[in-house]
Amino acid sequence: MKLSYLFYVITILSLTLSIKLDAQEKKVIEIPYSGFLTFDEEKYPGANVFTRDDSQQVHIVHGSINLWCDKAIHYGSEKFIEAYGNVKMIQADTITMTSKYIEYSGKSLLAYASGEVVLKDPNSTVTSDTLYFDRVKQQAYYRTGGKVVKDSSGTITSKIGRYYMNQKKYQFVTDVVLVNEEATVKSNFFDFYSDTGHAYLYGPSTITTKESHTYCEKGFYDTKTKIGHAIKKARIDYDNRIVEGDSLYFDNTKSFASATNNITVTDTINNSIIKGHYAEVFKEKDSVFITKKALAISVQEKDSIYIHGDTLMVTGKPEKRITRAFRNVKIYKSDLSGKADSIHFNQQTGLMQLINISRSAANDAFTKKRKPVLWNLENQMTGDTIHLISNTKTEKLDSLIVFNNAFIISKDTLSDDGYNQIKGLRLVGLFNDENTLRKVNINKNAESIFYTRNEKQELIGIDKAKSGSIYMLFSEGDIEEYTRLNQTDGGLYPESKYQEKDKLLKDFDWREEERPKSVDDLFKDDPPLNLPKIKGLEDYVPQEEFFDDAMVERMEKADSEAKTKEDEDPKASRRLPQHIKDQQKAKDSLKNKTSK
């Protein structure tokens, strides 16, 4: 036993020395320890077979690589190792790879692992059924499915994955899914930096949390701060709101999002939409702020209401939602339109308030211009404040109240400059089922001018009077009948008896040129808007071929230097994918034809 053991030790030392002497490169494959050495020329021609003993595994060293296994086959002329059983490979004490089987070429410096492969660095773990590890490029690659676990960032699975060790970058392709406690991210093209936790998404991608669902076709997500940026068909779905825009910024820790350019925010409960080119959404506060050609649309079955202003704010729980519009506000509906400095609309009560801004001087032209105004068919109504009440169940107009300085005007259609006019302190109007003004009461200090005509529509005279109040019925925008209460003076006189100035009541202000007659008219006074160019995310750079020309050239060189039988497959290039082999054959064939 002692002689056999001594012979074994001498053989191992001689073999190690022989490997070192025969190696032409600076870094050679060494076998610091092996339990047993055997030879099997029939099965492993030209190879040494090392197996472990009871004390420890076979230990193999090549440069900064240390490898342990239960059994190793070493092809000396090719500097090629096949390692079996509980294989562990460590590079420079930072990269560890374990598997059931590993092939390693000391010439091409490429390792191939299979069977429960696990590759670890200080910050992440890669698992796959098969994995390539290129020591030259310091890259790991799988193409049959794999998983990466990155501490707090979560777990990432994909069909194809690549780890750039020097850059701490992962590049995933096809069926990519990242899962952590806060979110699930899905994409087809996904770049991830393990040191920062930054993820870049390309192609149809989603980010799902308990509070939101985000979609984009190009995006960024910080897995540590939960902050992201989405562009290209970007959309965020909250519980009852959908936010869409050219560019979306979101902070999932605050349930906050801001959007830029071509924005649409849809209220799925109240069936309303707001649009603009800059918006901020606070989910926890149930609020939306939007500006730059801001437009609110209350979608109704037959006729939607449009509200436009410099700025819109929508706040409150779904059942108590309030819309506020500020600065040069306009509304449009097919049978109703208006203007005001500000509008306050309560969707629960159906009350819309058109509000004026007070100015220091009562006769300030700006104040006069900013008085709220409503148009319904042929009637123009103005006052200091206007309330418009809708039936929340039928979505139809119910009533109208004008507070202070109420003034209603309709043009006499058969004369060039005649106007029917009524003014007073307060106006109360009722709408019929067709959303047209049917009944009107003018209360306190009422004054009126009516152009009175006979059945042939011939002008009888101008009826001008003062009274305590006036009650009127309208039909298709025209005055059907009217009643004065507590009339103090006035009468019906021919038009010739009136001077031009007497045909208009004090504070008369015909504003037909301001009337919006379409949705587009809501924006006609707006200054030109130059939308900012969306920046910040580069286009996707397709994953370059792992088996590139430089690697294939390394393998070919390794194979050409090996002393193998002609009918034996070269070891260094044996794991090249078939399509790469086919490409190489085609190149070689073309090269041979060209040389001939």
Image: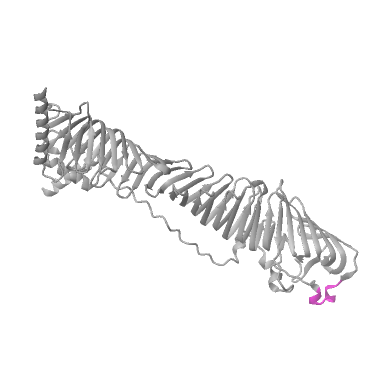
Colour scheme of this structure image? one colour
> Which residue is depicted at the point 64% across and 59% down?
325
Residue 295 drawn at (x, y percent) = 60, 57
Quadrant assignment for the N terminus:
top left
Task: Please tell me which residue is depicted at 73% across the width and 74% down the height of the picture.
Answer: 363
Tell me which corner region of the image, top left, top right, bottom left or bottom right, holds residue 422.
bottom right
Does 306 sit above or below residue 446? above
Q: Nearer the viewer, residue 41 or 461?
A: 41
Q: Is residue 48 left or right of residue 375?
A: left
Residue 536: x %, y % from top left: 42, 57
152 over 275 or under it: above or below: above
Q: Which residues are magenta?
A: 493-502
Figure disc tally: 0
Residue 451 is at least partly visible in this image: yes
User: What residue is shown at x 52% (from left), y 55% (from top)?
Assistant: 259
Q: Quadrant of residue 341?
A: bottom right
Secondary structure mostly seen in the magenta stretch: helix
Q: Is residue 501 magenta?
A: yes
Whole-percent x, y for residue 129 in the image: 31, 34
Q: Quadrant of residue 376?
A: bottom right
| Residue 347, above or below 359 | above
Q: Position of residue 177 (x, y in %)?
A: 42, 40
Answer with left or right where residue 236 lies relative to residue 513: left
Query: Does the rendering let one see residue 573?
Result: no
Residue 531 in magenta stretch = no
Query: 375 or 160: which is nearer to us?
Result: 160
Which residue in the rendered view is the most extreme toward the top? Answer: 1
Q: For this rendering, which residue is in front, 559 or 106?
A: 106
User: Between residues 1 and 446, which one lies in front from this camera angle?
Assistant: 1
Judged left or right of residue 68, residue 424 is right
